[in-house]
Amino acid sequence: MASLKSEDDQARFASVVLPHLADAYALARWLTGNRADAEDVVQEACLRAFRGIAGFAGVNARAWLLTIVRHAAYTWLGKNRSAALLVVDDLESIAQQQATGPGPAGEGPQTPEAALIAKADARLLETAIAELPVPFRETLVLRDVRGLDYREIAEVTKVPIGTVMSRLARARRRLMERLATDEAKGG
């Protein structure tokens, strides 16, 4: 009987958790700031998810897993470094992913100059996001980078939808103000 339950848990884990591992890793990467730490966090989150798979209600697997990842990341950060030191460093890889995706017909290859400008812009954006307060940064990343809807973000962060909307608006406003300031200094 115990092995049957274990097989059921393994099958449920595979169907609930595995499809969302890329989102889990991306969130962990944004919160920890590097690949190795993100891998540790996702591994811990997967262990927690497997232990709790029987309690999964079957509503929103992605939000359920990202909540576990978020908690695992904050536990890991609390043990390993100050929670105030959260670095955002994979915007470039996301920009590359989006750039290599299907584009409009007739769009030519990117010139070296355009690639250099895009890289500089990505660094400015990365820096501006990294300077946002943690609740704003987390909400912005979950919405604008990972594509979660307001309800999912509210579920992951355990705040009301109105708070999610407010944090997102404030994060975007601060980000735009920061980028405008940088542009004024550079231009």
Image (spheres, rainbow, N blue to C red):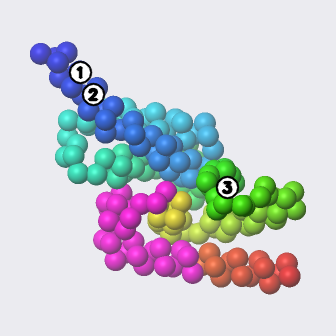
* Mark 3 touches mark 2? (CB < 8 Å): no
- Left or right side of 111 for 161: left
**Depicted 82 relative to depicted 48: above or below:** below
Q: Is residue 123 visible?
A: no
**Depicted 68 relative to depicted 187: above or below:** above
Our reading of the magenta stretch's main secondary structure is: helix
Which circle marks residue 11 in the picture? 2
Q: Tell me where the magenta segment starts and ends, as one range.
A: 146-173
N-term-proximal mark, 1 vs 3: 1
Q: Is residue 171 shown in magenta?
A: yes
Tag 2: Cα neighbours inside 10 Å, few (<14), some, or many (≥20)? few
| Residue 94 vs residue 37, the one in the foreground | 94
In the rendered image, which residue does mark 1 sit on?
7
Query: x, y (%) of residue 40?
Result: 52, 35
Query: As drawn, which residue projects farthest toward the left?
Result: 1
Assign a secondary structure to mark 3. helix
In the rendered image, which residue does mark 3 sit on?
99
Separation of residues labelled 3 and 2 (CA atoms): 35 Å
Tag 3: Cα neighbours inside 10 Å, few (<14), some, or many (≥20)? few
- Left or right side of 156 for 4: left
The image quadrant where one finds the N terminus is top left
Residue drawn 32% across the image and 65% down it: 151
Query: What residue type is disc 3 on?
Result: Ala
Separation of residues labelled 1 and 3 (CA atoms): 41 Å
Q: Is residue 77 shown in magenta?
A: no
Assign a secondary structure to mark 1. helix
- Left or right side of 128 for 108: right
Query: What residue type is disc 2 on?
Result: Ala
Q: Is residue 168 visible?
A: yes
The image quadrant where one finds the C terminus is bottom right
